[in-house]
Amino acid sequence: MNLFEQTFMDFLLEHQEKHGRTYHFLILMNSILNAAKRIQHYYLTGALKGYLGLTGQVNVQGENCLRLDELANEVVKHYILRSGRVIQAVSEEEKDIIKMNPEGRYFVYYDPLDGSSNIPHNLPVGFLFGIAKRNLEGPEDFHLRAGKEFIAAGMFVIPTGTFTIALREAGCWRFHIDEMMNYVKPTRINLPQDRSTWELSFNVAHRDYYRREISDWLLKNEKKYQFRYLGALAADFHRLLTNGGLFLYPAIINHPDSKKNYPQGKLRLMYEAAVVSFMCQEAGGSAINEERKPILDLIPTHHHQRTTLFLGSKELVEEIALVL
Ligand code: AHG
Ligand code: MN
Ligand code: MN
């Protein structure tokens, strides 16, 4: 056994030095890891201490408590602000763009708690983030970055304790939390070529409300693969990265209850779809929307914009693209 497992910070230090980079990114990543560990702690202790209540509820100590997704948002905001390295952030939980340090260097787009319907069951949730860099050559124009401009994107699966991060042109890597709450033991993730482990992942309840071509494609192809769906993008994508296959969240257009239609798709581009698509690309996969455009090429017009998503093994994304 290796007495001293390589930690994420060791790994990143080596990466930054190898590429002659500054340490600013390490400082930012340290704040993101601190936030993830704090969310992990709240999740693990939440049920006992009453943190998992709804907004406005009072916990067993008689204190007002936040929903875990709001609590997670406060935690991430606190730590990344303190890093001093963030110019602006976008959070799923905040209507407006969060202005931080005008002298900062990075933009952070995050979903502090993904898959919140799993919380009451103590099933996995995620914390997703994408990072882009300010324009260092000239004046910063504050445009919303497309996924292809990310320098890194990652996700923590909570409380399982895995952390997966993709660094631009440097691969997708997975770490595991140890007894000292360090993320250790990097392993490089590449989507498997062998179809035998591939899985399909989508909300079956919606299958009749997708565009006809998509429902037909599913009917024709689904028996070739296993089916898995946890209802948390981070957790579903976590499986897919190891087993390969296809995750899809198409537009919902034919729901009998029109309020349940999502003509643009449900997932958010900047802090959900672009994050997993960036990771998927670094693991050898790809991702497109229902118009067959690469997710990473989409330039957001609004920071909370939604998108459709077809994500996973390249060949399977190409196969479904033929009917889109
Ligand atoms: P969030 O909890 O951040 O709002 O995200 C939930 C998202 C995503 O994680 C998941 O893949 C999807 O919603 C599940 O949606 P359905 O319940 O419609 O399947
Ligand atoms: Mn989410
Ligand atoms: Mn969320």
Image (spheres, grey):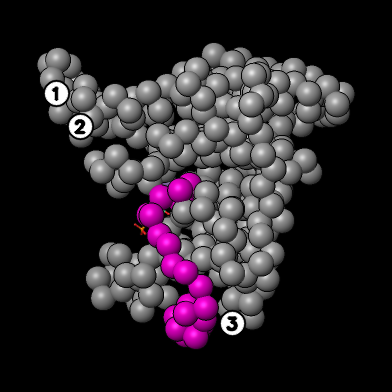
Q: Is residue 51 visible?
A: yes
* CB within 8 Å, label 2 to label 1: yes
What residue is rendered at 73% in x and 44% in y? 171
Could you say which quadrant of the image residue 109 lies in? top right
Kindly identify the amino acid type of the residue bearing the numbered disc 1.
Answer: Val
Residue 52 position in % (x across, y down): 24, 31
Crowd around label 2: few <14 · some 14–19 · many ≥20 (10 Å): some
* CB within 8 Å, label 2 to label 3: no
What residue is rendered at 20% in x and 32% in y? 53
Give how far apart the Cα atoms at labels 3 and 1 are.
51 Å
Q: Earlier in the sequence, mark 3 or mark 1?
A: 1
Pointer 1 residue? 58
What residue is rendered at 62% in x and 70% in y? 195
Circle 2 SS class: loop
Residue 50 position in % (x across, y down): 20, 25
**Disc marking residue 323:** 3
Pointer 2 residue? 53
**Disc marking residue 206:** none
Q: Is residue 319 above or below residue 105?
A: below
Residue range of the region highlighted in magenta in the rendering: 212-235
Q: Is residue 65 above or below residue 242?
A: above
Q: Earlier in the sequence, mark 2 or mark 3?
A: 2
Q: Is residue 87 visible?
A: no
Kindly identify the amino acid type of the residue bearing the numbered disc 2.
Answer: Gly
Q: Is residue 57 rendered to the left or right of residue 15?
A: left
